[in-house]
């Protein structure tokens, strides 16, 4: 009853001073919009990382070259010490490792007609498809035969596809990679972004990469698939034994390679991501608090300006409680309208960026409302108490 | 007896200094009296009106309004009394400038919690009684002084108060409009209302049936007209 009246009065008083109201609302809107957008970004990133984690499974190890250390001193760079034969040896020797995928990754420029795009070029073997659970969404992966023949065939990541072909199908088209002609045989699905963009890649047979494109005989990394995640220790032992022997490392020398569990690596990425997201949310919250201070400021001014109105209302029978709620409701309405504008603005911005404005988590829309009305009531409380406690006679005489 | 004031003192504190405003005021007013309060500025008229209107309470002494001891009431109870028993008419009208005449008149009923349709009807009736039926949707800052004062009178009447307090109701009006307002007051008195009116004008005071003159916080004279 009284609350409805209060809402009516609040809307009326906001209309009285439109510019001031809009400026105050904007403070809240920008604040909550920023918070909401950061939250959305964070959630989307988390979702993509989680999807990748699920697709990877927990039983893949990544072997990369590393600097070796001798008595704490870094020895010569040894990024060229991983060999394809070692990948084969690990697979055949170890009982717990079921597959190995050697890869060599270099930089390249892909060209199609008048489009060109700088990208990573990854040479690998057909096992890559099953071990990484990364199947082409169109076309096919290359075969053992093509690997043996050093065939000039390639699969495109989603970004490369989009940059070179837009929406068109790339299959059977001919593109240039570092000025050498390749036939596109497959298109890989988008994996989403994390640190680097895994979609900005072209996959070609390892032999083609090593011999035709880059002229190298070493690898960038080896993926080793374990029989199960419990075989980690034994897998690690096997890998270390083989690689240390091949690299002729003395017992006092550290490994000149590193073995990482892919899932653990991504977990770290996820945690770091979460930390960054939380930090940015805090910054966004600060702007929301500034918006709240704006509301408090405007409410204080309003209360002073309307001293006489307060006096009139009190003289004809309004209780302190009525005055208190009137101004509190006004501040909360400022907060809520600001919240609505902020959410709408956030959706608009999101639409502008991603082409889909509505993929905003609903629970966060709810939280935004609660946060905005909360800020409104906190910001309005002190001015409202001031208003309610004004001396009636003085307020009536106020000019 | 509507009003019984007994030995009322009111003292204001201005910093460290005590300023006496009312000095041993004793006053009885019956139902359906029409009383004028007169006196030079600083005589305590406003203070007396504030206490009579339950906007303020005596420092010492007792004030009974319709047998209720006003001095013992808390802020909420005083608000209730102002809301249901007293109608104010001010020199400066004291309307909400950006609200319609109708909204101004129904305002006291909002605070007494009457449902919207009921109080709208009542407000329209009262506005008709003061001759403003065609201007009730106008905002009060679009009305003339006389019209504003009639809105204020309508607002004072809406709760069927026991007591109408008019503080120089013609003070901001030209004499012709002032007379119209005094006529309305006269009519309200004849309809059975109790009215206390502060005025500087002898000819207005002469139309009431009792004149109380104040000087330096003391009742100087109190005589029937």
Image: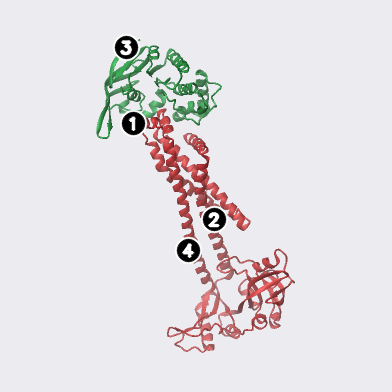
Chain colours: A red, B green
Query: Residue A237 placed where, x, y %?
Result: 50, 82
Nearest-to-viewer mark from 2 and 3: 3
Chain for disc number 1: B
Please tell me the numbered disc located at residue A275.
4
Chain for disc number 2: A
Nearest-to-viewer mark from 3 and 1: 3
Residue highlighted by disc 3:
B223
Q: CA distance from mark 2 to mark 3?
A: 77 Å
Q: For numbered disc 2, what is the local secondary structure?
A: helix
Query: Residue A72 placed where, x, y %?
Result: 43, 83
Q: Residue at x 39, y 30 (%)?
A: A396
Query: Residue A55 placed where, x, y %?
Result: 59, 68
Q: CA distance from mark 3 to mark 4?
A: 85 Å
Query: Residue A219 placed where, x, y %?
Result: 59, 81
Tell me the quarter of the picture where residue A318 sits.
top left
Residue highlighted by disc 1:
B74
């Amino acid at each position: 009853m009284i609350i409805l009246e209060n809402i009516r009065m609040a809307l009326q008083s906001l209309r009285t001073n439109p510019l001031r109201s809009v400026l105050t609302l904007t403070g809240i809107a920008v604040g909550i919009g920023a918070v909401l957008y950061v939250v959305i970004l964070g959630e989307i990133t988390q979702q993509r990382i989680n999807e990748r984690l699920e697709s990877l499974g927990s039983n893949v190890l990544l072997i990369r070259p590393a600097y070796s250390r001798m008595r704490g001193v870094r020895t010569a760079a040894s990024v060229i010490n991983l060999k394809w034969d070692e990948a084969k040896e690990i697979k055949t020797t170890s009982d717990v490792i079921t597959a190995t995928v050697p890869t060599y990754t270099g930089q390249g420029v892909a060209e199609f007609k008048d489009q060109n795009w700088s990208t990573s070029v990854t040479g690998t073997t057909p096992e890559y498809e099953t071990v990484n659970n990364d199947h082409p969404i169109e076309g096919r992966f290359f075969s053992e035969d093509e690997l043996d023949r050093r065939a000039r065939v390639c699969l495109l990541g989603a970004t490369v596809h989009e940059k070179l072909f837009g929406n068109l199908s790339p299959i059977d088209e001919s593109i240039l990679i570092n000025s050498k002609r390749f036939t596109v045989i497959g298109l890989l699905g988008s994996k989403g972004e994390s640190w680097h963009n895994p979609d900005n890649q072209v996959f070609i047979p390892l032999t083609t990469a090593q011999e035709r494109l880059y002229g190298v005989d070493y690898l960038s990394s080896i993926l080793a698939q374990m029989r199960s995640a419990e075989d980690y220790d034994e897998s690690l032992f096997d890998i270390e034994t083989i690689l240390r022997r091949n690299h002729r490392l003395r017992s006092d020398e550290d490994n000149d390679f590193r073995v990482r569990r892919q899932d653990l690596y991504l977990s770290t990425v996820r945690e770091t991501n979460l930390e960054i997201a939380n930090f940015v949310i805090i910054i966004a919250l600060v702007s929301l608090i500034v918006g709240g201070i704006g509301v408090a400021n405007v409410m204080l001014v309003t209360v002073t300006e309307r001293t006489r109105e307060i006096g009139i209302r009190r003289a004809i029978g309004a209780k302190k409680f009525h005055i208190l709620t009137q101004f509190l409701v006004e501040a909360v309405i400022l907060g809520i309208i600001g919240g609505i504008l902020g959410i709408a603005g956030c959706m608009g911005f999101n639409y502008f960026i991603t082409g889909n404005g509505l993929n905003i988590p609903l629970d966060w829309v709810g939280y935004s409302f609660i946060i905005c009305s909360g800020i409104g009531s906190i910001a309005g409380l002190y001015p409202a108490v001031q208003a309610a406690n004004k001396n009636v006679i003085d307020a009536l005489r106020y000019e | 007896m509507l009003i019984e004031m007994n030995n009322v003192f009111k003292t204001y504190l201005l910093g460290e200094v005590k300023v006496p405003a009312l000095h041993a005021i004793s006053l009885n007013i019956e139902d359906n009296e029409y009383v004028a309060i007169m006196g030079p500025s600083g005589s305590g008229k406003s203070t007396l009106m504030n206490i009579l209107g339950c906007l303020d309470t005596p420092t010492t002494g007792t004030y009974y309004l319709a047998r209720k001891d006003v001095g013992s009431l808390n802020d909420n109870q005083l608000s209730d009394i102002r809301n249901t028993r007293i109608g104010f008419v001010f020199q400066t009208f004291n309307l909400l400038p950006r609200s319609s005449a109708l909204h101004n008149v129904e305002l006291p009923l909002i605070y007494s919690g009457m449902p919207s349709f009921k109080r709208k009807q009542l407000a329209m009736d009262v506005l008709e009684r003061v001759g403003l039926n065609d201007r009730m949707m106008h905002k009060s800052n679009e009305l003339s002084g006389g019209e504003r004062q009639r809105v204020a009178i309508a607002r004072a009447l809406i709760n069927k108060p026991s007591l109408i307090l008019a503080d120089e109701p013609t003070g901001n009006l030209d004499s012709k409009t002032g007379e119209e307002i005094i006529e309305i007051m006269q009519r309200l008195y004849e309809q059975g209302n109790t009215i206390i009116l502060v005025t500087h004008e002898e000819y207005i005071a002469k139309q009431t049936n009792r004149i109380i003159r104040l000087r330096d916080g003391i009742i100087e004279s109190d005589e029937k007209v």
